[in-house]
Amino acid sequence: ITFLPQKREIAMPIRQILVPISAGSDAYLVISNAFNLAEHHKAHVTVINALDWAPQFVTSDVYGSGAYYAEVIKALDDERRKSDKKLRQDFDTAVKKSGIAIADRAMQDAPTATFLESSDEKQPRWTFACLCDLVIARRPISLTTLDYDVAESALFDARRPILLLPPKGAHIE
């Protein structure tokens, strides 16, 4: 009688989840779905503003003075701050409803979460995805949306698995 080794499944543990999301009507759903997954895996969720995901470029094909470029950059920063405020409210609501602990890193026996405020760093935020086991984002509805840039960067720049949620998706249980 010959005994063959049993086939074992090898699952990648999910300990770090990154949620790059822009403020919108369904941001709360995406964050709460990430929290549900984190509770199942006892993982840490980091929520960042998708406007920080990639650097904002002011192209040279738009002609204008230095003051014009400064005005455009200021408008982008203002939009990012407004988006941060709304995202923080959605994050706080999801934390309150889920009871997930706020911490800077994962704990052994409990899910945790943190919200990273926008920063003026020169390094694009997708580099955070390289340190995560999974990226959760909205499913892009077209090739010209910020959600598309997030998905493409997570897959091809950071080389991370990504879970894309429908824009007005149902809750994941």
Image: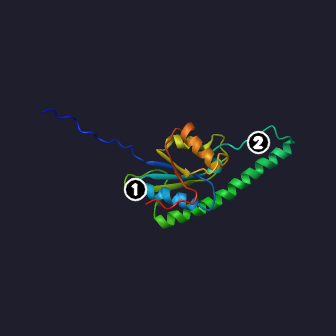
Marks 1/2: CA–CA distance: 42 Å
List the single residue furthest toward the bottom. Answer: 97
Q: Quadrant of residue 5?
A: top left
The correct choice, above or below, for 154 with respect to 74 in the image is: above
**At x 73% / y 41%, what residue is drawn?**
57
- Residue assigned mark 2: 58
> Residue 108 in the image: x percent, y percent?
38, 52
Which mark sits nearer the N-terminus, 1 or 2? 1
**At x 53% / y 59%, what residue is drawn?**
169
Q: Nearer the viewer, residue 160 or 73?
A: 160
Specify the amino acid type for callout 2: Val
- 1 horizontally vs 52: left or right: left
> Residue 132 in the image: x percent, y percent?
49, 44
Q: Nearer the viewer, residue 120 or 144?
A: 144
Residue 102 appears in the picture as rendered: no
**At x 62% / y 46%, what residue is drawn?**
148
Q: How is the image coloured?
A: rainbow
List the single residue furthest toward the right. Answer: 65
The correct choice, above or below, for 66 with respect to 38 in the image is: above
Q: Secondary structure at mark 1?
A: helix
- 105 horizontally vs 28: left or right: left
Q: Quadrant of residue 23?
A: bottom right
Q: Secondary structure at mark 2?
A: loop
Task: Give the label on residue 74, or none.
Answer: none
For mark 1, does the 10 Å Cα neighbourhood hold few (<14), some (14 to 19), or many (20 or more) residues? few
For mark 2, does the 10 Å Cα neighbourhood hold few (<14), some (14 to 19), or many (20 or more) residues? few
- 120 horizontally vs 71: left or right: left
- Determine whether label 1 and label 2 are within 8 Å by CB: no
Specify the amino acid type for callout 1: His
Task: Give the label on residue 40, or none.
Answer: 1
- 6 horizontally vs 30: left or right: left
How many numbered discs?
2
